Amino acid sequence: RSNAAVYCKPRYSSAIVKLPADFETFEASMSSNRRSGIRRKWRIATREHDDVRVEFVTPEPGEIPEQLARIMALEGSGWKQRSGTALSADYRMRCFITQLANAFVHEDGLVFAFLKFCGHDVACRFILRQQSGWFEIKIGFDEEFSHFVPGILLTHETLREACRTGMTKVDFLGVYERWQDNWPHEVTEDYRFATYP
């Protein structure tokens, strides 16, 4: 109400997936083409690799360095390393992510998700859990296995696990991207707002 300079500008859009009480209901809301495409890729992966599984880790404080090292290895294996956005290439972000993990681990608010082929990590998710939502902080995959779309396979199983554990939403955070259209979602707008009296 007093004299001030006000600055408000849209920053970017991000996607949020709302989850029902059971995953079968959620899958039924998906496009049949996308649903069958994910199942087909999973079958191809299991046909070419004897052991395909998803691992969810809710770490103890002492396990954080090991789990972050797994994330960094996957991120550092491809385009994120080349573009300088991987944790191993960005010291400030690596420090921030480590502090974030240490802050949330004490409230069981930290989840690491990995897709594994024959014991080898091929995709990952670093997730924060707060109240009834999962929030994706970092994702990555090994480009050597990109023809299996490991990131999409892991995302689908992450949504399944979130639903199984009673979560009502998964927030992709970051910038909305086309691959997120595999699942029904809402797009939200983030704004930068500042006032200078």
Image: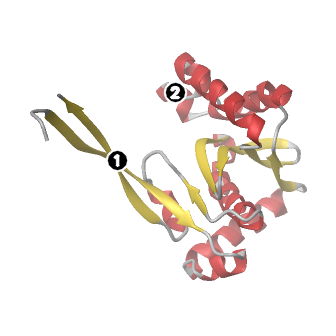
| Residue 93 appears left or right of 122 | left
Which of the 4 image quarters holds residue 74?
top right
Assign the C terminus to one quadrant of the image.
top left
Q: Residue 127: horizontal and vertical position, in percent?
A: 66, 45
Q: Residue 194: horizontal and vertical position, in percent?
A: 25, 35
Q: Amino acid at mark 1?
A: Tyr
Please tell me which residue lies in front, 85 or 161. Answer: 161
Check the image and report above or below for 85 versus 109: above
Which of the 4 image quarters holds residue 178?
bottom left
For label 2, the SS is: helix
Number of residues whose C-alpha sits closer than 10 Å to that of mark 1, classed few (under 14), some (14–19) or many (20 or more): some
Please tell me which residue lies in front, 118 or 126. Answer: 126
Q: Which residue is mark 1?
A: 12
Q: Which residue is mark 2?
A: 82
Task: Identify the residue at the far front of this view.
Answer: 1
Query: Marks 1/2: CA distance?
Result: 23 Å
For label 1, the SS is: strand
Residue in the picture at 71% in, 71% down: 39
Q: Nearer the viewer, mark 1 or mark 2?
A: 1
| Residue 63 appears left or right of 103 | right
Q: Residue 146: horizontal and vertical position, in percent?
A: 63, 49
Q: Amino acid at mark 2?
A: Arg
Task: Identify the residue at the far left of this view.
Answer: 3
Label 1 vs 2, first from the N-terminus = 1
Task: Identify the residue at the far top of this view.
Answer: 91
Residue in the picture at 81% in, 43% down: 58
Residue in the picture at 71% in, 74% down: 23
Q: According to the image, what is the colour scheme of the structure?
A: secondary structure
